[in-house]
Image (spheres, rainbow, N blue to C red):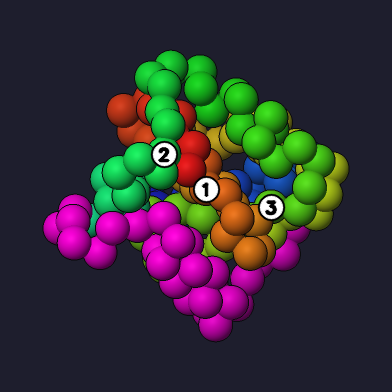
């Protein structure tokens, strides 16, 4: 039995719904992850999950099992990038106008992050049903 990465689940969902996306290459992925880390994460916190390392006062959260359904409110029809906790799961870039919720409906639940190419914002839905916005 083959185990899919989280990005592979989202890629399969996008393919089944006819949604265009771009897989960021390793260099783009590393650069964007570093921008997100620099802007939102506290390097002094010894936790592995990014959402556990968000800077105090920089994030707001709400616990809601269906909170992931609100993701499209944050992308507001603009281009966005989805990534996951494990760096080797890659990053997927979507063009303006794509709705992420229908893709997530087709995939199993997992921790994911949404940002833009400049890392101006960060939205996360974690495995404790928290929607976190920074």
Real-space Cα distance between discs 3 and 2?
A: 19 Å
Real-space Cα distance between discs 2 and 1?
A: 9 Å
Q: Is residue 74 magenta?
A: no
Say whether disc 2 or disc 1 marks the residue closer to the N-terminus.
Answer: 2
Q: Which residues are magenta?
A: 21-47
Q: Is residue 39 magenta?
A: yes
x and y percent of residue 63 in the render? Answer: 38, 19
Name the one closer to the observer, 16 or 75.
75
Name the one closer to the observer, 102 or 132.
132
Q: Label 1, on which residue? A: 122
Left or right side of 93 for 9: left
> Quick one: SS at disc 1?
strand
Q: Residue at x 55, y 82 (%)?
A: 27
Mark 1 packing: few (<14 Cα in 10 Å), some, or many (20+)? many
Q: Where 124 falls versus 66 (above or below)?
A: below
Say whether disc 3 or disc 2 marks the residue closer to the N-terminus.
Answer: 2
> Quick one: SS at disc 2?
loop
Disc 2 vs disc 1: Cβ atoms closer than 8 Å? yes
x and y percent of residue 120 in the render? Answer: 60, 55
Say whether disc 1 or disc 3 marks the residue closer to the N-terminus.
Answer: 3
Judge depth for marks 3 and 2 and give the one in front: 2
Q: Residue at x 66, y 36 (%)?
A: 74
Q: Label 2, on which residue? A: 59
x and y percent of residue 35 in the render? Answer: 49, 68
Residue that protrudes farthest toward the left in the picture? 46
Q: Which mark is residue 80?
A: 3
Q: Where 26 falls versus 72 (above or below)?
A: below
Mark 2 packing: few (<14 Cα in 10 Å), some, or many (20+)? some
Residue that protrudes farthest toward the bottom in the picture? 27
């Amino acid at each position: 039995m083959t185990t899919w990465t989280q990005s592979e689940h989202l890629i399969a969902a996008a393919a089944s719904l006819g949604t265009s996306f771009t897989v960021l290459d390793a260099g783009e992925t590393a650069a964007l992850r570093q921008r997100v880390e620099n802007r939102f994460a506290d390097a002094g916190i010894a936790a592995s999950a990014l959402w556990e390392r968000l800077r105090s006062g920089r994030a707001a959260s709400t616990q809601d099992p269906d909170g992931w359904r609100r993701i499209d409110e944050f992308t507001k029809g603009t281009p966005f990038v989805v990534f996951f906790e494990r760096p080797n799961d890659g990053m997927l870039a979507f063009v303006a106008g794509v709705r992420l919720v229908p893709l997530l409906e087709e995939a199993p639940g997992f921790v994911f992050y949404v940002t833009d190419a400049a890392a101006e914002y960060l939205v996360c839905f974690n495995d404790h049903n928290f929607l976190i916005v920074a």
